[in-house]
Image: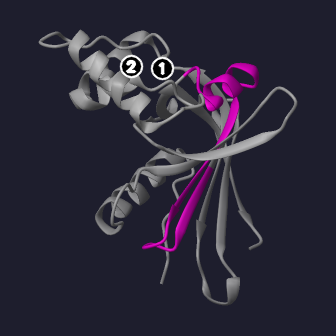
Amino acid sequence: MNEFKLAVEEPIVLFNEWLKQADASELNNPNACALATADKSGKPSVRMVLLKGVDERGFVFFTNSESQKGMELSENPNASLCFHWKSLDRQVRVDGAVEKVTTREADAYFESRARESQIGAWASKQSQKLKSRLNLEKRIDQFTVKFEMKKIPRPECWEGYRVIHEKIEFWAEKKFRLHDRYVYSRFGTEWQLSKLYP
């Protein structure tokens, strides 16, 4: 049975419980989620990102601010996330406004990345057209030499974003498509919990 307990006071408690269970059951990347953004005209786009932090302030991911998602978030600072854990027959949807994390938070996470990933952040002109793989490899070589034996600083365009959860829906699969759906909606500092039809 796909049962779960609900804590009306704070949905992040339940989310962290589910994420911990997914960490034990998913083959890889239990922190992967679909990120939906929209440009200033409202035209949507979606892609997968990795959740790198979550607390009562929101859900954090990192990316190049000059990428498509970065540009869309600058035009329309609202987003949705969707986590889907097939091994648990569960998903979670998160909606909210988006803000950038502090420089200190971005620096701290960048420093925690593998050196090769740090080089990659400098080498990749994320979302821009790439003539060939060779061009990317040349840029990787260029920045590898540039930062040889040096601490690699965070590129200014490599930033963190926080989705400030205003609504979180928890979905659990049931037989005959009669799923359990509970949604937390924020009203000021309080959370209202509702059950939805499947």
- The label nearer to you, 1 versus 2, is 2
Relative to the observer, which residue lies in front, 71 or 162?
Answer: 71
| The quadrant where residue 17 appears | bottom left
Residue at point 53%, 68% (across, down): 90
| Residue occupying the far left of the picture | 149
Helix, strand or loop at mark 2? helix
* Contact flag, marks 1 and 2 (Cβ < 8 Å): no
**Left or right of 166 on screen, residue 154:** left
Q: Is residue 167 magenta?
A: no
The residue that appears at 61% across and 25% down in the rendered structure is 70
N-term mark: 1 or 2? 2
Is 89 or 137 nearer to us in this picture?
137
As drawn, is 98 to the left or to the right of 61?
A: right
Q: Residue at x 39, y 56 (%)?
A: 30
Instruction: For the C terminus, give its image quadrant.
Output: bottom right
Q: Is residue 81 magenta?
A: yes
Residue 177 position in % (x across, y down): 69, 83
Q: Position of residue 88 (x, y in %)?
A: 45, 72
Q: Which residues are magenta?
A: 65-93
Disc 2 target residue:
122
Residue 143 location, quadrant: top left
Horizontally, is 195 left or right of 91 in the view?
Answer: right
In the foreground, 128 or 18: 128
Name the residue carrying label 1.
Answer: 159
**Residue 122 in view in this figure:** yes
- Marks 1/2: CA–CA distance: 12 Å
